[in-house]
Image (spheres, grey):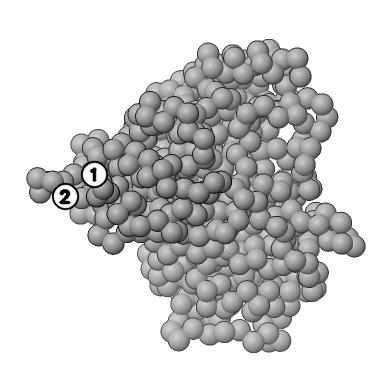
Amino acid sequence: MPDLRFKPTAAQSTDIPRPKRAEGQWALGYTEPLNKNEQSKKDDDPLNVRDRILHTYSRRGFDSIDPADLRGRFRWLGLYTQRAPGFDGGKTAQLEEEELDDRFFMMRIRTDGQVLDGNALRALGELSTAYARNTADITDRNNIQYHWIEIESVPAIWERLEGVGLTTLEACGDSPRPFLGSPVAGIAKDEIIDGTEALEEIKRRVLGNPDFSNLPRKFKTALTGHPSHDVAPEVNDVSFVGTVHPEHGPGFDLWVGGGLSTNPMLAHKLGVWIPLDEVADAWEGVAGIFRDYGYRRLRSKARLKFLLADWGKEKFREVLENEYLHRALVDNPSPEAPVTQGDHIGIHEQKDGRFYIGAAPVVGRIDGTTLTALGDLVETYGARGARLTAYQKLVVIGVAAEDTAAFADDLEKIGLTARPSNWRRSTMACTGIEFCKLAIVDTKERSRALVTELEKRFPDLDAQISVNVNGCPNACARTQVADIGLKGQLVMDADGNQVEGFQVHLGGALGLNPAMGRKLRAHKVTSAGLDDYVTAVVSAYLADRTDGERFADWVARADDVLLRGEPVAS
């Protein structure tokens, strides 16, 4: 049962929309769990599992783990069982979760916009090589993700992470997931406002706080004061976006209810001005509404976007102001959207005269050896450190002007590059069937091969075209808002065999004119035929585009035969 102190204090004065059926909203009195996930959280606050990991499971081994912890509460500590080898994509929806469980874990380390200095980078690298078979992926939520973690190793990993200011706490689960922060916060010459202080305050207040450890489902946060909107704010549950009020100066607009997956929705822009020192209050208010009024009956509707779809942004703002903030927000037009959102790749001058260097691995896949070497480079050159980005990339901060060329050269030697091709720069991929129990197809290796092939076929591409590859419909790689989004599924090849393939989304975009990608009716592409399909579509775009026309704009007007990659009759 939720603590009564969680109930809003002014519910009597605000007209709350009531759904046609009970949706498990705490604030409306529906406090009895309506599914097994809610029951599990009621039985025991998931934060309590930390002690069991430290003192029981890590000592007694995998077989000692309570199934309710293993497939539920472990997520609040950043741990998922990974997919056991030998199960193809056809088994994903046919087998129960426990049948797909391996005896190893994926571990997610949150960075929340933090600058990783040389010590932190080396710690991440050394933990990877010691405990994770040298695996380490940069995710599109500023995380480092390990695989092959054994339960016996977790206490030692946590101790080392905490020694450099990092944690796995609430990196997964029905909780405040890792925050997206601008990788150039506090250093960019064109920044509107530095949101670092606000992001740190949110983290201080809520991480590990039982008031926010039982949300209806995941809750994703983004904050940026940079005009390039470099944290994909349109597709997060709550986003704070830098803006300027004509009288009050720089602050943040509040965007709510964004999200992708099987019911994609763009965030609602409230058109307000929030000062830096009130951002954390607003975050608590939005999260509080989600906790108290969010739908808990069906997991498929337990995201903030569904509440916004039913309430509308005016009602949401009214409840936020009346019941949670107890004050009116200041009206201010939402900031102008950039043409495309910034990834900060390349060499750029900071406002203090030093430089930041944005570098790209291939689809976020690096390893412990690379992280350790990067930590050494940071210290050798006296740089401040590195931040991770919302695009599976990293940005090294504080490189001296005279060292930028040498630093960029040394990045190449460790497998990173500040001078990537479009394809390496603009391709993302989720974990895929290699480790994920929800995936249907391979993503990481298939995407790496695609990047290599497209670099050969289009070595001098003069346009930016993003390719996002996902192993299932959940859109962890943001497939619906890419120029070319590929959603993994099993398809039939020309010989009638069921093989790995993709449903194609074309022309998705964030920034100026945001939109979900266009799906072509009954159109699927096999994994084996992917290189040729992308080549055909990109070739058609290059031949048919008008001067300066973006890929997404071309898709909106192009004939279906071109988008299907089919030969055009002469």
Q: Would you place residue 318 above or below residue 372 in this image?
A: below
**Residue located at (41% from left, 28% from top):** 455
- Residue 143, percent across and down? 54, 39
Q: Is residue 488 visible?
A: yes
Q: Residue at x 45, y 86 (%)?
A: 20
> Please, what is the three-letter code of the amino acid marked with disc 1?
Thr
Examine the image and state in which quarter residue 534 appears.
top left
Characterize the local packing of mark 1: few (<14), some (14-19) or many (20 or more) Cα atoms within 10 angstroms: many
Percent position (x, y) of residue 3? 60, 69
Mark 1: which secondary structure? strand
Extreme residue in the front direction? 570
In the image: residue 196, left or right of residue 230: right
In terms of secondary structure, where does tag 2 sit?
A: strand
From this view, report whether residue 359 is shown above or below residue 84. Answer: above
Which residue, given by chain and number where applicable, does mark 2 sit on? 492
Callout 1 touching callout 2 (CB < 8 Å):
no
Please, what is the three-letter code of the amino acid marked with disc 2? Answer: Met
Residue 346 image offset from top left, x and y in percent: 63, 28
Total label count?
Answer: 2
The label on residue 332 is none
Q: Return the x and y of residue 336 as percentages of the image width and height.
A: 70, 57
Upstream in sequence: badge 1 or badge 2: 2
Quadrant position of residue 185? top right
Q: Mark 1 — residue? A: 526
* Residue located at (66% from left, 16% from top): 405
Q: Is residue 438 visible?
A: no
Q: Residue at x 53, y 85 (%)?
A: 18
| Outermost residue, right side | 247
Task: Classify residue 99 as left or right of residue 24.
Answer: left
